[in-house]
Image: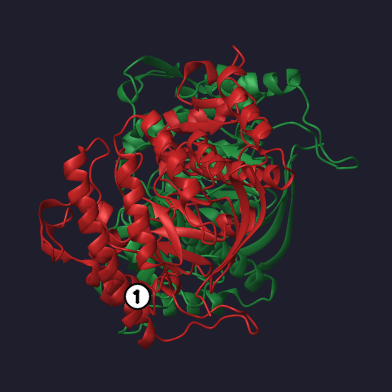
Chain colours: A green, B red
Amino acid sequence: MNPIDWKVTAADGEARAGVLTTRRSVIETPVFMPVGTQGAVKGIRFESLEQEMAAAIILANTYHLFLRPGVDVIRQFGGLHQFSTWDRSILTDSGGFQVFSLAALRKLSEEGVHFQSHLDGSAQFLSPEVSMEIQAALGSDIVMVFDECPPGDEGHEATRKSLEMTARWAGRSKVRFDELQAVMNPVAIAPGSDISSKQALFGIIQGAGHLDLRRESLERTVEVGFDGYAIGGLSVGEEKPVMYEVLDFLAPQMPAVAPRYLMGVGTPEDLLEGVKCGVDMFDCVIPTRNGRTGSAFTSRGKINIRNAKFAVRSEPLDPDCTCSVCKRYSVGYLRHLYLAGEMNAAILVSHHNVAFFMNTMRQARQAIKDGRFQQFHRDFIDKLTHNQPASV
Amino acid sequence: MNPIDWKVTAADGEARAGVLTTRRSVIETPVFMPVGTQGAVKGIRFESLEQEMAAAIILANTYHLFLRPGVDVIRQFGGLHQFSTWDRSILTDSGGFQVFSLAALRKLSEEGVHFQSHLDGSAQFLSPEVSMEIQAALGSDIVMVFDECPPGDEGHEATRKSLEMTARWAGRSKVRFDELQAVMNPVAIAPGSDISSKQALFGIIQGAGHLDLRRESLERTVEVGFDGYAIGGLSVGEEKPVMYEVLDFLAPQMPAVAPRYLMGVGTPEDLLEGVKCGVDMFDCVIPTRNGRTGSAFTSRGKINIRNAKFAVRSEPLDPDCTCSVCKRYSVGYLRHLYLAGEMNAAILVSHHNVAFFMNTMRQARQAIKDGRFQQFHRDFIDKLTHNQPASV
């Protein structure tokens, strides 16, 4: 038995709709996973994610939770699900990306990464083995291998070196992961379910903007063998055409029999580009991060509620949106809350943004099932870029 | 027809339970009114106040809304209800208290108060007439007279002078209020309702800690005649015994045929002291203000979730609380969110605190109806102060 079940239920070009079942929930794909960095989705109560948005999976960050509250605390609660009370699926990243983007005084070796905590400067160490151990303690349902993430515009030679490290680390991740699964307490799953109660492990393909290296990384990752495959190292500073080129080249070559996950990307346009290329899973902080600065994603493009023209606007953020914020609140009111420094502005705009991302994926899913994804994609982009009325 | 209907449904000593009906909602008293200073209750969505807490009335601040977004904006939306989407009752204060606590360079005259906005230093003016005009534009259901609020420890002579100004301003407030009601658009109210569709106006009793002046202020306020009566100028720096003495002396003398409102007070203990003396309505920012600093009101006293002893505590903030936060989240998790700088900590603790205040009033109401308020009061205070287990 595998720790996940994966079925492609419809395809339209390279785009595909599927159902991913983990030991904790059934996830319809393509899916956007809200980011709960520190065990909470910023500004949004779990109740809203569950009841209104029907989110079946969120992401949490190993690096952050490792440093605070720490593994010991979460272990005492019985894992991140019990600690946070989110009882549907959780995917944890490996900590690698944050070590390379947040931590100070990194010292990289074959063994792993020594670094200083960005919180208190304390000396810390992460390696494939340690990352697997932390993620086992967190008890996430999908675990990511510990990888090295080079800058998006890294040269060929440096990228190759990094990629080889990532490949060796993938192997070590797998070994330690398997050891841990053998001794972990099983999680209760639905009777008659044909999946195991273990964690699943996803591999990560690196290679920056170099297609030959992406291809090589793909082969070496598949060689190790994982429950799912992720594209790492995109949206990390490279130009957008480079990202789209990599997606277009790589995604269709990834194993069709496993879920494909594009890490840390991106805008609604980026997500649909990924879906077009056959990606199934996405996560990104921008709906909540932008929500906190009053920037809303809408079907007519991005708007910033601080704009003076919104002062007496009684329309919702997005007249086409069905979320509880758009059904009730006007842009004028949200603008007032933002300018008045009320956290309710961040709460409401973040809510809308996450709902908009999830609804967009829901619509893409339906379009794939109906065999009209290409048209949906074109209409979506058209509306986004050309249909913005002068009055908005 | 009066703009409100007020019925005392049960009494127990001086304490009373009642039903206050405004043109927009039916309010069971004693009631705690959550504070929506700038047209939103900080960190709590209206949906939670409506659905979970069954709040029937909130308070909004004239001073803040006058300065931002300004009366013109709110008027264009048709009033504060339409602007904010809160469609139950709103009570607005007069702006007086904030002018005296927040604004700079105040210049007080018989006419009113010239001051500088605390936001941008702009020159502003408030008077009884202007305050009534703003509150008419906001369209609140209960309007407060414009009063002068002296410090809680003000001497006898200065308090008397201030009180006389307040009395003259009460008269002027009433005159302008009546003029405005005569020309205001009616609000749609339930057919067959025996109240008018107009705003209600409450008078305010001042007099600091001087009982003779409180008595005089009461008489002069009742002489003008209002729909309800408020006790102002408490919890503004005076010692707590002074506040309790004033409450004990003043509240029972206030007209029994009108609702009694204690402004800006206080802790759960203060609220129950007010109820004991016959007060019906309360508002205070402390449940949300304390919520933002991780301080929770519970049936066993106040706790600060930052405390290290809560790190692995799996119990809720208050095991006796039925709110959605206590039903789900542990103190350990809330502490983590707070220390991690997650706004969800403020959201969840504020929610609990407001729910706790409202539940306390609900229990007091029931105790009055059952004729056991005194016992309830004693048990509540006992538990709060003596029953705190060493482990919490």
- In the displayed structure, A317 sits above or below B19; it is below
What's the residue at 48%, 77% (across, down)? A319
Q: Is residue A47 visible?
A: yes
Total labels: the figure holds 1
- In the displayed structure, A392 sits above or below A243; it is below
- In the displayed structure, A147 sits above or below A314; it is above
- Quadrant where the N terminus of chain A sits is top right
What chain does badge 1 belong to?
B
**Label 1: which residue?**
B136
Secondary element type, mark 1: helix
- In the displayed structure, B79 sits above or below A38; it is below
Work out whether residue A264 or residue B66 is closer to the camera in this orientation and state it: B66
Considering every residue shown, the one lying at the far top of the view is B390
Work out whether residue B214 or residue B308 is closer to the camera in this orientation and state it: B214
Picture coordinates of residue B326, whole percent (x, y): 63, 37
Picture coordinates of residue B358, whole percent (x, y): 58, 46
What's the residue at 61%, 79% (across, down)? B194
| Res B257 → quadrant | bottom right
Q: Is residue B70 visible?
A: no
Is residue A307 shown left or right of residue A52?
left
